[in-house]
Image: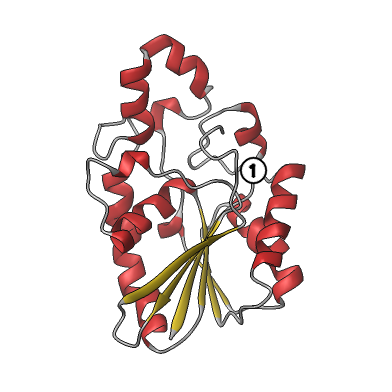
Amino acid sequence: MAKLILVRHGKSTWNATGQWTGWTDAELNEDGVAEAKRAGEALRDVKIDKAYVSDLKRAIQTLDYMKETLGDIPTEIDPALRERSYGIYTGKNKWQVKEEVGEEEFQRIRRSWDHPIPEGENLKQVYERVVPYFEKRILPDLKAGKNVLVSAHGNSLRALVKRLDNISDETISELEIGTGEVYIYDFDGEGNIVNKEVRASNPNKGKV
C-alpha cells in the first residue's frame, strides 16, 4: 500500500488581495505559512519517501515549511505542476471581474472545464500537462510502494483529482480545494485507489 498526498500551497500575498495569480511568482503570506505548517503537522504520522513540487515559489515554500515537521524529503521540482495561467486576467481582482462580466461568465472563467481564456489556459489544458506528468513520474513510485507528496496549486490539483476521482467535465466546476488542505489517497500495488481522506480542511475554501 502506498499513499499519494496532495497539498495545495498556503495562502499567498495575491490570494489575500483576491488577485488571479496564475504563473506570477507570489510568496506565502503569514496565514499561508501557518497553513503550510498545519499541513505538515497533519502528516506527522506518515513517512514520505518522495516529494514533487511546482516550480512556483508559493508551492516550494509550502513544502519547505512542511519539512520542518516531516524532515528532509527527496524532491523533484517541475513546471508541469504549475498553477493554471490566467492569461489576460492575471493580476486582476477576481471579485471586480465578477461585477464587470456577471456571475455566469465569471464562473466560466474561474471554474469551467474548457472555456477559452485569452493568452492563458483553461482546466482542460492544465489537465493535459498535469496528468501525463503524474502517470509518467509519480504513478510508478506509487506502484513501487512509495509514499509520495505533491505540493502544488488549486487548479493543477483540481486537474489531478479529476483524473483520480473520475469527475465528469460537467461537475469538476464544483470541486474546491482550500489553501493548505491535504488530500490522501491510498493505492494498491496495481495503481488502484482503495481509500481517500482529507486532512487540514480549510473552512474558507473558495473564498480566495
- In the image, 204 versus 49, the foreground residue is 204
From what the image shows, is residue 10 above or below residue 136? above
On the image, the x and y values in percent for residue 166 come to 26, 58
Count of numbered badges drawn on the protein: 1
Q: Which residue is mark 1?
A: 11
Amino acid type indicated by mark 1: Lys
Q: Quadrant of residue 42?
A: bottom right
Left or right: 59 in relation to 166:
right
- Horizontal and vertical percent for residue 51? 54, 72
**Residue, x 43% and y 54% (percent of image)?**
157
User: Image height check: is 176 above or below 3?
Assistant: above
Residue 88 in the image: above or below residue 100: below
Density class for disc 1 (Cα within 10 Å; few <14, some 14-19, many ≥20) is many
Kind of element beneath mark 1? loop
Which quarter of the image is occupied by the N terminus?
bottom left
Report x, y in % for residue 154.
47, 47
Q: Is residue 49 left or right of residue 168?
A: right
Relative to 146, is 26 on the left or the right?
right
